[in-house]
């Protein structure tokens, strides 16, 4: 099979997903030219309907199986309406050869773009090498549609050491997160030179994307840690209902939404003024904060309903701020209850995390629930894999987390045991690759 033809921007996006099997052609006996044309046509339809700048709900797929644009002003998987599943991996670069790393980024870009339209990671895929060749795709997503797959890359602070000549290009905001009160961080679940976030509506499609990225990186990168997530814990679009976390509460009611482009510009995308000089490659990008938060499920499940609601600051069933009736009612922090105490306790999570109590700070949340077996002493290792995208982590996430760590009563039921920060570059232009401006 030949490489697919270049995408045609004027072609319409398909109404439903095109399977990897379909893109290979109906039979191995098809003429090579016919297979190439069939794949090229399917590949070209990706994204043509809308750029991947994700500034409006128009970027949402027509169905859960439909492809999402890969190229555009910003990376997909940030403001994109959050999919149901996620596979996140942090990697360390094991080579010191800059050319090898750049070549891998180019291979990853090609593979990611193919997989997001439902194609295999490389031409030929499962069968192209013949019975004695190594397959160029691992095959577990063969026959499955695109499933709304997005693949997003980020660069960690440690990548900007002296190995690849990138130190002068490190943005000022890309600093390792400080220690926060109550942290119990596991080094094997923290940090990383690179990260890949794969989100999809089918878990097998997300896992397939990460698996093939890792396969392509053999000898250049190694897996540092990874996390599977299910059940998104935030809505990133007004088209989505607010989901629930493993404590049973609606999570992220006041999250930033794709339909608020001015807010997204203010709080998510890095501007040219933020990154002068050699760091200008980050303009149009954003910073990804990842925190693995273990929830002490067993303790929470023995806590009475009123204590749970006082801890969060919302009703469990409706998700309304305490003292109000509906989920999207504005919290009234001056409102008193029958006992003349604040209806929303002073140490409630909602009060401390609200922008009005954080000098206007807002973040774009995109987290997922996780359950990773047990801890060996009969308790579930479960919780929230918190992901946030911010314009400046030092001015947004750090002061927010410091306020929560100091006073939030929710800390009695959770612990942060993994942490990382990555710079996500802007989107990929036609003919470009992930991070091309950084390595130019």
Image (spheres, rainbow, N blue to C red):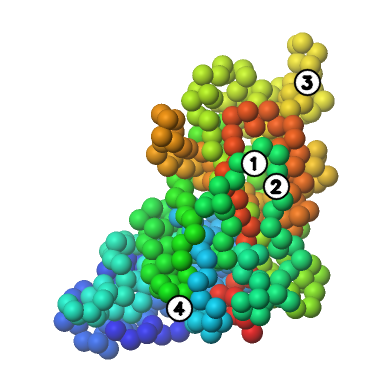
Earlier in the chain: of badge 1 and badge 4, it is 4
Per the image, the residue denoted by label 4 is 107
Element type at marker 1?
loop
Earlier in the chain: of badge 3 and badge 2, it is 2
Q: Are marks 1 and 2 in contact (CB under 8 Å)?
A: yes
Earlier in the chain: of badge 2 and badge 4, it is 4
Q: Specify the quadrant of the image occupied by residue 215.
A: bottom left
Earlier in the chain: of badge 3 and badge 4, it is 4
Residue 371's disc is none
Asked whether, in this view, residue 69 is left or right of residue 405, the answer is left
Asked whether, in this view, residue 171 is left or right of residue 114, the answer is right
Element type at marker 3?
loop
Earlier in the chain: of badge 1 and badge 3, it is 1
Q: Position of residue 364 (x, y in %)?
A: 65, 51
Q: Are marks 1 and 4 in contact (CB under 8 Å)?
A: no
Q: Position of residue 184 (x, y in %)?
A: 61, 41
Per the image, the residue denoted by label 2 is 179
Q: Crowdedness of circle 2 by 10 Å Cα count: few (<14), some, many (20+)?
A: few
How far apart marks 1 and 2 lie (CA) works out to 7 Å
- Residue shown at the point (69%, 53%) measured from the top left: 177
Per the image, the residue denoted by label 1 is 183
Q: Tell me the quadrant of the picture where the C terminus can be found.
A: bottom right
- Residue shown at the point (42%, 30%) measured from the top left: 377
Per the image, the residue denoted by label 3 is 342
From the viewer's perspective, is the residue at label 1 or at label 3 nearer? Answer: 1
Q: Position of residue 38 (x, y in %)?
A: 31, 80
């Amino acid at each position: 099979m030949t490489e697919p033809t270049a995408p045609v921007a004027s072609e319409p996006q398909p109404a439903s997903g095109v399977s990897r099997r379909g893109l290979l052609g109906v039979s191995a006996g098809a003429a090579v030219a016919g297979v190439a044309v069939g794949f090229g046509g399917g590949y070209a339809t990706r994204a043509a309907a809308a750029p991947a700048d994700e500034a409006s709900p128009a970027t949402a797929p027509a169905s859960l199986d439909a492809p999402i644009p890969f190229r555009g002003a910003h990376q997909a998987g940030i403001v994109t309406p959050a999919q149901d599943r996620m596979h996140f991996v942090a990697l360390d670069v094991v080579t010191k050869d800059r050319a090898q790393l750049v070549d891998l980024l180019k291979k990853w870009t090609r593979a990611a773009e193919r997989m997001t339209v439902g194609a295999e990671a490389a031409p030929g895929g499962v069968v192209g090498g013949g019975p004695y060749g190594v397959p160029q795709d691992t095959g577990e997503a063969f026959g499955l549609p695109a499933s709304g797959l997005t693949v997003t890359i980020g660069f960690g602070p440690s990548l900007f050491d002296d190995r690849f000549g990138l130190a002068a290009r490190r943005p000022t905001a890309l600093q390792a997160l400080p220690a926060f009160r109550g942290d119990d961080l596991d080094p094997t679940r923290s940090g990383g030179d690179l990260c890949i976030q794969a989100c999809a509506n089918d878990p097998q499609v997300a896992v397939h994307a990460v698996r093939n990225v890792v396969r392509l990186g053999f000898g250049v990168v190694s897996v540092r840690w990874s996390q599977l997530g299910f059940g998104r814990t935030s809505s990133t679009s007004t088209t989505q209902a607010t989901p629930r976390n493993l404590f049973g509460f609606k999570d992220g009611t006041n999250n930033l939404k794709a339909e608020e482009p001015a807010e997204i510009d203010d709080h998510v995308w890095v501007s040219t003024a933020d990154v002068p000089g050699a760091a200008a490659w980050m303009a149009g990008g954003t910073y990804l904060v990842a925190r693995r938060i273990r929830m002490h499920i067993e303790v929470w499940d023995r806590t009475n309903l009123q204590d749970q609601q006082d801890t969060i600051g919302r009703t469990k069933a409706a998700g309304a701020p305490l003292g109000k009736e509906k989920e999207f009612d504005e919290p009234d922090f001056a409102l008193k209850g029958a006992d003349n105490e604040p209806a929303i306790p002073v140490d409630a999570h909602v009060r401390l995390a609200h922008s009005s109590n954080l000098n206007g700070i807002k973040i774009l949340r995109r987290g997922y629930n996780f359950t990773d077996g047990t801890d060996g002493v009969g308790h579930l290792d479960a919780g929230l894999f918190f992901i946030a995208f911010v314009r400046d982590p030092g001015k947004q996430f750090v002061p927010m987390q410091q306020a929560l760590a100091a006073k939030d009563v929710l800390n009695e039921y959770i612990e942060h045991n993994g942490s990382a920060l990555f710079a996500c570059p802007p989107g990929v232009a036609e003919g470009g690759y992930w991070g091309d401006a950084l390595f130019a």
